[in-house]
Image (cartoon, rainbow, N blue to C red):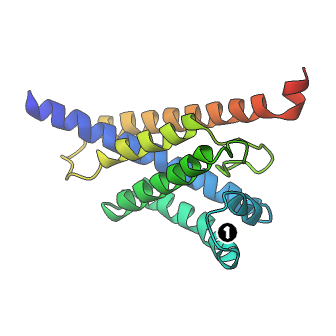
Amino acid sequence: MALLGEQALALFGLTASLAVGLLFLIAGVDQWRHRALLPGVIANYRLLPRRLLMPAARALPLAEVATGAALLIGLHPLAVLTGMALLLLFAGAMAINIARGRGHIDCGCGHGALRHPIGWPLVTRNVMLAALLALRLPPAPAFTMMDIATATAGGIAITLLCLLFQSLAALAASPAHRRS
């Protein structure tokens, strides 16, 4: 019975790894497409000195794409640890700004055309994704093709749900929606 529990946790870890990999890949590509906006988004957090804004804006999309790809192809533990570090870094940056009363700033989570204000739900999401990703750290048992298909479907579903809720929150916060 314990072996079944270990297998289930390993499968959840694989699912989380695929979901976070897809989220990083999508966010990194989108940030690269809207790279002219990214230095301003990073500057709004007021956590980096001015001289580090451009290097951070250049490095962030590349780090997200590289981490996302590494998670998708199963490179771990380095990819898992990097993914967890990025998620917790983003959660920490948001939490600091929320504590400062600056919850109105754009999270920079991806889509450049939609402003998505930071908030505790985003902090919680990132911490939960990092915790789920930690399930991928222990050596995993061999997965069957059905396990891999299940994890892939679950990873895609989690990714789509995260993107859906992110888009809905951004739309709800948009000025056009608030006027209605």
Which residue is farthest top?
A: 180
Residue at (54, 66) in percent of width and height: 63
User: Which percent across, then down, holds residue 99?
Assistant: 58, 45
Residue 2 visible, this angle: yes
**Residue underneath mark 1:** 57
Q: Is residue 136 above or below residue 35?
A: above
User: Which percent across, then down, holds residue 83?
Assistant: 43, 56
User: Which percent across, then down, holds residue 2?
Assistant: 9, 31
Quadrant of the drawing holding the C terminus: top right
- Quick one: 117 or 17, which is closer to the camera? 117
Q: Secondary structure at mark 1?
A: helix
User: Which percent across, then down, holds residue 132?
Assistant: 36, 41
Which residue is farthest front?
A: 100
- Quick one: 152 or 52, which is closer to the camera? 52
Residue at (43, 33) in percent of width and height: 154
Residue 144 visible, this angle: no
Q: Amino acid at mark 1?
A: Ala
Residue at (56, 54) in percent of width and height: 93
Q: With 141 as the anchor, is 11 left or right in this view? A: right
The number of numbered badges drawn on the structure is 1
Q: With 98 as the anchor, is 85 left or right in this view? A: left
Q: Residues within 10 Å of mark 1 (few under 14, many from 20)?
A: many
Quadrant of the drawing holding the N terminus: top left
Q: Is residue 144 above or below residue 87?
A: above
Residue at (21, 48) in percent of width and height: 140
- Quick one: 8 or 146, which is closer to the camera? 8
